[in-house]
Image (tube, rainbow, N blue to C red):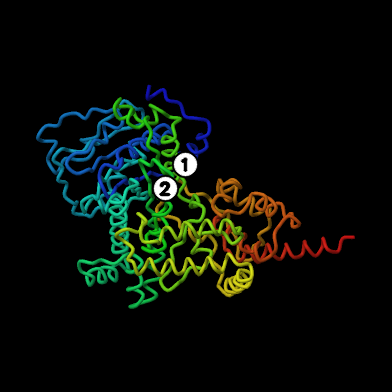
Amino acid sequence: MHERWQIRPDIRKLAAEAQRGGPLVVAAAAGKGGVGTSIVLANLGLFFAQIGRRVLLIDLARGGGNLHAMVGHAARREGPQAEAEDVALEARIEDTAIANLAVVPARPADRRRAPGLGWRAWLEETVARLLPRFDAFLFDCGAWPRREAFDLFVHAAAPVVVCAPEPTAVESTLGFLREATNRFLAHEPDRGSFVREVLAAAGQTPPTPAELLERVADRDEGVARELFRHVQTFVPGLVMNQVRVRSDFDLGPAVESVARRILGIPLRFLAAIETDDAIWKSVRSGRPLLVEAPSSKPAREIERIARWILLPDAAPRPGAPRLREPGQDANLYEILEVDRGASEEEIRRAFRRAKDLYSGQHVATRGHVSPAEQRRALARVEEAYETLVDPNLRRPYDRTLSEEEDSEPGAPAGSRGDVPERAAAPAAQVRRPQLEEGTEYTGALLRELRRQRGMERDDVAAVTRIGTAYLRAIEEEDFDALPEEVFLKGYLRQIARVLGLPERNVADTFLRRFRAGRRRQARRP
């Protein structure tokens, strides 16, 4: 039945995109055991196999994992020679009943030593050696993996961390991600020595990545800026598994917000997988979830994770906060995580969410955000709310913000803002046209660039919270349907950020057309 499972029409386009890409290298881990890492990774492997990838699942869990069982495979019993340290990975590959899917089961007494050439080089060498046979490699690193698997997670092109919506799992997950991000910075080939010195000086109380960059900036601001750009290429994805109630669904974005805004971890929330009878039925029957219940809600969330891995340039969730460079502060809209055109009701809802997050009792802040940091964050939230909810204070603030942005140098073409491109992304990168510095960004050009990135208007609207009617009016240059210039400027900057375009150039050139169009319309009898 596994071989006969048919690909649905709505993912044929995604399959075509995936086929044009290079090898996928995915590493899944968790801060705490029992959260479902193996289930998520096994079904991701099945998804990739069904769209034509030749997939190898590799179980690195301590003491013997059960990744093979999640795809209905019974691992063969190995003799003493197979337990030797020097047995090549190829000798332990086992084909499964699923087409295009093989697995390397974990060994019961796995004591794998770090290879002499280092895990990054080992990973590259292993992938290169097995490429003739496989083009997707999925590693199950287990719960808070030992050092070598930890480094493999850090260097994988698509790291995914799985968490459950309960306090100890969230605290362990953020702790794991803090260490992973610090290790990623410490491994930077040119400037990592600065990071290692700071970490050594910290002793048994390592700083958060944000604090680490601030300490590096105290020594050398130029190095801190380089490391800040480097850390944005490490984008672990967060999967919240076993969610049950509304607060569980909201926990993923809250953890992402704390990670990015307070801790300096470039985390991306991917999906919330609801607790469903289909999951335990699939485990008991030995059949993957995507075969047992392909139309279930958890299966749809697995597909969402797969899309992020295959299309790493996809925009983040609406309102996702941006990482802040050392010494740089967020504006009031960013503090509340709302769009500049947000209504009063949207601002009030955002204030309630933020106030709850930094109230001192939230699961996402427990163990990693000190009471003093929470008080400072809450004070900023209250300041933002008091300013933005009052029209008499909001209007002058908007003017000041626009003037400050006008004085900033334009971002270089291709910069992603809060959507950084990952280094050596595993899937096909979207081809971008060559745009010159003096390019005039018309509505038609913005529409063409959006389509070239494989995005619909709804996708842009979901990220920017700009209404689709406004997006259509921008692309069609229906100037009568557009808002006032102060709001339109903010919209254009957000659209440019999502599309990876120079924000200032896009806003300036389109606004010139906007003003000229309004003048022509005013002269009409």
Image coords of residue 502 (percent x, y): 57, 63
Callout 2 crowding tier (Cα within 10 Å): few <14, some 14–19, many ≥20: few
**Amino acid type, callout 2:** Ser
Which residue does the image show at 19% across and 28% down from the upper left? Answer: 76
Residue lying at the far left in this picture: please name it. Answer: 80
Per the image, the residue denoted by label 1 is 20
Question: Where does the N terminus fall, quadrant-wise?
Answer: top left
Question: Where does the C terminus fall, quadrant-wise?
Answer: bottom right
Image coords of residue 505 (percent x, y): 62, 65
Image coords of residue 285 (percent x, y): 30, 25
Image coords of residue 133 (percent x, y): 33, 36
Q: Is residue 45 above or below residue 514?
A: above
Image mark for residue 247:
2
Picture quadrant of residue 359: bottom left
Q: In this view, does 113 lie above or below 439?
A: above
User: In 3D space, how far apart are the residues under numbered discs 2 and 1 (Cα atoms)?
Assistant: 39 Å
Mark 2 falls on what kind of element?
Answer: helix
Which residue does the image show at 27% across and 40% down from the upper left? Answer: 58
**Left or right side of 26 for 325:** right
Image mark for residue 125:
none
Mark 1 falls on what kind of element?
Answer: loop
Q: In this view, does 24 lie above or below 349?
A: above
First reached walking from the N terminus: tag 2 or tag 1: 1
